[in-house]
Amino acid sequence: MTDEFKTVPLRPGQKLVVNGVVVRMGPDGQSLELDLKTPVLTEDELMNEDEATTPAKRIYFLLLVMYLDASSFDATYLPFMDRMIELLQATTIKEVRENLRIIMQCVDSGRLHEALQACRALVLFEKEVLSLAESSSGAARAG
């Protein structure tokens, strides 16, 4: 599959509207300026379903689906809650439980971009924990 992009020539300072968001070419002609309230996701914040291989990543992916496609919110909410409950029941780590609470508050109040940010922090924490566990088990096998 090839990525399809449309080239839109802009002059420095010129504005355009993309999906209801006003975007302006920066004065340097090399950057885009967005309204401060506009949530933005960069390539490193996107995830495919096959990359959702850990509990935190599964939650993140479902949040991402709800965020990118508002019409999928109702269909995605129940699987999202199932993953949240599974992780909550599987951990006693205070920081993880607090992060899950924050994610839930954000989702309940419609702040999906904030929920994604909180979940991204959870994914990074999970990665650290898994890395430590992996190095510990490797050291135990070597000893």
Image: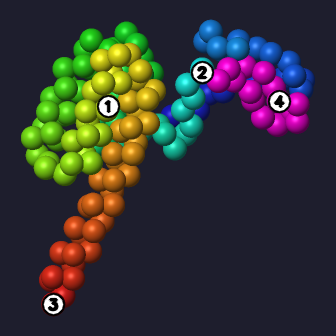
Q: Amino acid at mark 4?
A: Gly
Magenta region includes residue 101: no
Pinpoint residue 114: horizontal percent, then vertical percent. Answer: 43, 29
C-alpha separation, residue under disc 3 versus residue under disc 1:
40 Å
- The residue labelled by disc 3 is 143
Q: Residue at x 82, y 37 (%)?
A: 30
Sequence-wise first label, 2 or 3: 2
Q: Position of residue 75 (x, y in %)?
A: 25, 14
| Residue denoted by label 4 | 26
Tell how many labels.
Answer: 4
Q: Nearer the viewer, mark 3 or mark 1?
A: 1
Q: 108 or 6: nearer the eye?
A: 108
C-alpha separation, residue under disc 4 versus residue under disc 3: 58 Å
Q: Which residue is mark 1?
A: 103
The reply to whether residue 100 is visible in this rendering is: yes
Residue 38 is labelled as 2
Disc with the residue nearer the chain's start (1 vs 4): 4
Q: Callout 2, which amino acid?
A: Thr
| Residue 26 covered by magenta stretch | yes
Please, what is the three-letter code of the amino acid marked with disc 1? Answer: Ile
- The local crowd at label 1, few if under 14, some if 14 to 19, many if 20 or more residues have their Cα within 10 Å, is many
Element marked by disc 4: loop
Question: Residue 86: where, in percent of width, then height?
Answer: 13, 37
Q: Residues under labels 1 and 4: Cα distance?
A: 33 Å
**Quadrant housing the C terminus:** bottom left
Highlighted range, magenta: 23-36
